[in-house]
Each structure stands twice: as structure tokens, then as C-alpha cells.
Image (cartoon, rainbow, N blue to C red):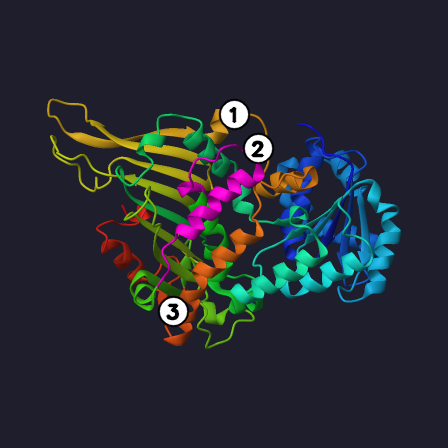
Amino acid sequence: MATTPAFDIVFFGGTGDLALRKLLPALYQAHKAGALHADGRIFALGRKPIGLEGYLDLLQQRVRPKLGGDYDDKVWESFVSRLQFQTLDAGNIEDYRKLVAAMDSPGNRITVCYLATAPHLFIPICQNLAAVGLNHPCVRIVLEKPLGHDLESSGTISEAVGQCFAENQIYRIDHYLGKESVQNLMAIRFGNTLFEPLWRREWIDNIQITIAEDLGVEERGEFYDRTGALRDMLQSHLLQLLCIVAMEPPPSLSEDAIRDEKLKVLRSLKPFSTEDVLSKSVRGQYRSGAINGMPVAGYREELNVAPDSNTETFVALQAEIVNWRWAGIPFFLRTGKRLQERVAEIVINFRDVPHALFPSPLGSHCANRMVIGLQPKESVRLYFLAKEPGDAMNLQSTYLNLDFHAMSKSRRADAYERLLLDVIRGQLSLFMRRDEQAQAWAWVEPILECWNKHSVPPKPYTAGSWGPAASSALVSRAGVVWHEET
């Protein structure tokens, strides 16, 4: 693996959950693999004056246990030698000047400023970075989702950040785009002649995209109660996956060629009318139940959640793309917390044969389907019917399985590791452009407005189930079922 150029990576929110749970473990893995330049440095920023020693103690408690069998004493020691800790108040310009002084000639290397903070801090952080000169062409700014809470607030953030940084310096991150299986979806579609002729309305019956979590809101109750599943997951992760599935072949793999095609998909999404929202969307909220045989509390009993909260923890939608390739094909999007299992997958259900010669096995609707597994296992399974052994001509469902872990024994970088390396190397293909972000919010906002205007309450569902019964009814009206229910 090629090493990065020399860099400084600065984590705003360096003591927060995202940095400790995802970002620092990802950098450790990149360091262990030899992907980081020997002169790369990591600056962690936090409001509490815990100092470097206190921060290293925090890493021992929170980061080291997440490394599991990948932990190595010598590698750990060399990794933490890259670290520095700075106390910083996002609104205090003097703290930024101290940061610049600690970095010592920051213009001689790539500087990545990763904003793992609440969105309301994005603007003051970027303005203060610009005020102390940390917006020169070698600086890259990474913005975590959600970028605002609606179209207006997202636009306000984008405009303010755009006044401090050029668009090619801004990396709007969606970690699902860094998953190996998502990249393989593009390779399968655009690197083979087998699927492209079938990847259209004439041969596909419906497409389902699911991101299901068995966890609740954990310690994010205050954030989640202001956000909800539509803003937190569907507006970002699910729509980005939809774009990868539905986009036209780009003329090249350049960053703007790919992002241009994704933008065309977002612009082709049929807008939701009030009637569409009421008939083609489902809001849900989990009640107490059981996960893996263990009782769990309902959403309203979670820490820092209002006891009368109407925030949705589940959303399902039926979307349509109005262009020649996809017109009339339903795209079902679903995400939720405290569901039956943790799974993220894309299911391409192909049309049935025009004339059935053989008796159909039970439950064989859409017998030909492709299931792209994103988590917990990364795989592609192609389902079809084959003859059962015996004298009778009976068919059974079977599949070809492409298991990415079995396919290659080489180490696989996780999504955040890949994306962090892309930022340092200046590769923008897997990051959202400003117009993409705005178009996604423009499509989602009428749904939010309708829910609020008509006071659409979330439908209750039991923790450990697959969500509200209305979700099953949504797809059944199109004559299909969710993939997990087959």
C-alpha cells in the first residue's frame, strides 16, 4: 500500500465518540499497514484541559479495546507518538493561534481539519480557521453529517464554509461510500457486460435498500431526538446508495464525472406530494421489547429523550426515479433502530419469466435477484432457480455467492480508514459535492414538512421486530415483500 504525503490531521471533537470509536482506530490500522507517511502527525482537540497524558489515558480506555487482535504493543507506541493534544474552545480565536503555533509551519504539508462536532459549530470553526490562515490550498476540511437539519440550514452552512474554503477543499463525508462492497457494486455494474443490459426497467421489478440496526440510540439521545431517522440516515446514507445503484455509467472515474451522474439521479427523483407522503412513507418509533433474548427499553425511556417524543426511529419510503431507465420501478428505502438484526443490503429483484414452464416453489416471487450485502458481511449473492434432485421437474431456489473476505486474504481497510486516506491524498470521488447535498435536502424536505403539518405521529413497533406493520403494507401494495420477510 502506497504511503500518503506528509500530513497533519486535526480532529475537532478529538475526545468525542466518533473520534474514539471510529476515526482513531481507523488511523491506527492505516499506520499499522504502513499507509501513513512517517512524518504524519495527529492533533486531537478538546475543550477540557486534560493534556497529552490524560488524552493517552483516554485512548487506552476507549480506543485500544476496539483494536482487538490487531493490537500490537510496538505498533501502538509508534502510533501514539504521532499524537498531540490541544485544548480548544471552538469560539476562541486565541486557541486557534495556539494551534497554528503548535503545528509549526503548517503550510509545508497537507493539513486535514476533521470536524467531528455538532453541525452548529461548523461555521465558527471554519471562520476561525480562515482567520488564522488555516484555509490555504493545502488545507482540507472534512464535514460530518448531518449537514444542517433542513435545506435552509444546510445551505447556510455550505455558503459560510464556501466563503472560507474552495469547493475542492471541502470533503462532505458519508462513510457508506467507503465500504468495499459499495465500490464493488460499481465494479460489477461498469466493469462487466453481463449486468448492464439487465440494469433497467424492462428487467427489474423493484429495488430495496435497507440499513437496519439492532442498537438503540445509546448515548446519543439528545442528538437523535432533534434529528430522527429521516435526517440521520435516509437523507445521507440511503440516498447515496440509491445514487450508486441507479446512476448512469460515468464517462470516467474522475471525481466530478461520478458526482455528476449521482446528481442526475437526485434530480430525477419524483418529488413527494402531500398524498404521496401520506401513502408512500412510514414513520415508526420503537417500544420496549427484546434483542437477542434480552429486554430493552423503548425509545421514550432512553437517556436524554423526551418522554412524549414523536421523533421517528424508523422510516420506510417508496421512491421513483423519473427517467428512461427507471420510470415506473419502485425503489423501497428502509432504515431503523432496534430492529431484528443488524444488516445493510441492496436487493435487486428482477422480473419473473414471462411464461412459467415449471411449478413455482413456495415464496419464489422475484426468483432472480441480486443481494449486495454491505454489513455485517460484505458479499454479493445472485439467486436463481435450479432443478431439485429427483425424478420430478421441481425447482428450488439457490444462489451464487461472492464472499469478499473469502475472495481475497489481503487486509481490507474499513470505510473510515479508506476515506481518511482519500482526504489526505486529495481524492474527492467518494465525497458529496455541494449541489448533491442541496438536492438531497430538497427532495427530503417536503416529507418533513408534511409530517409536521399533518402531525403524522410515528407508528409504534416492538424492539426486535422488523418495524411497524405499515412498512410491510407499504411494499405489499406493490405486490412484493421485504427481503428479510421472504
Mark 1 lies on a secondary structure that is loop
Where residue 214 sits: x, y (%)? 45, 54
Q: Where is mark 1, residue-wise? A: 408
Q: Residue 139 or 31: which is nearer the viewer?
A: 139
Identify residue for label 3. Answer: 458
Identify residue for label 2. Answer: 412
Q: Residues within 10 Å of mark 1 (few under 14, many from 20)?
A: few
Q: Is residue 183 above or below residue 406?
A: below
Tell me residue 60's x, y (percent).
73, 49
Callout 2–callout 1 Cβ contact below 8 Å? yes
The three-letter code of the residue at mark 2 reads Arg
Look at 19% across and 26% down and name the residue there: 388
From the viewer's perspective, tell me whether residue 413 is left or right of residue 299.
right
On screen, residue 164 versus residue 357, left or right, reads: right
Tell me which amino acid carries mark 3.
Pro
The amino acid beneath tag 1 is Ser
Q: CA distance from mark 3 to mark 2?
A: 39 Å
If you read the primary sequence from the N terminus, does the residue marked by circle 3 or circle 1 appear first?
A: 1
Residue at x-position 77% and y-position 61%: 128
* Secondary structure of residue under mark 2: loop
Query: Which circle's residue, 3 or 2, is located before the other in the chain?
Result: 2
Q: Estimate the x, y position of residue 125 in percent, counting from the top left.
A: 73, 61
Which residue is more in the foreground, 443 or 121?
443
What SS does tag 3 mark?
loop
The crowd level at tag 3 (other Cα within 10 Å; few <14, some 14-19, many 20+) is many
Taking depth in this image into account, of 295 and 221 the one nearest to the observer is 221
Query: Quadrant of the image for the C terminus?
Result: top left
Over which residues does the magenta segment extend?
Answer: 244-272
Q: Is residue 443 highlighted in magenta?
A: no
Q: CA distance from mark 3 to mark 1?
A: 44 Å
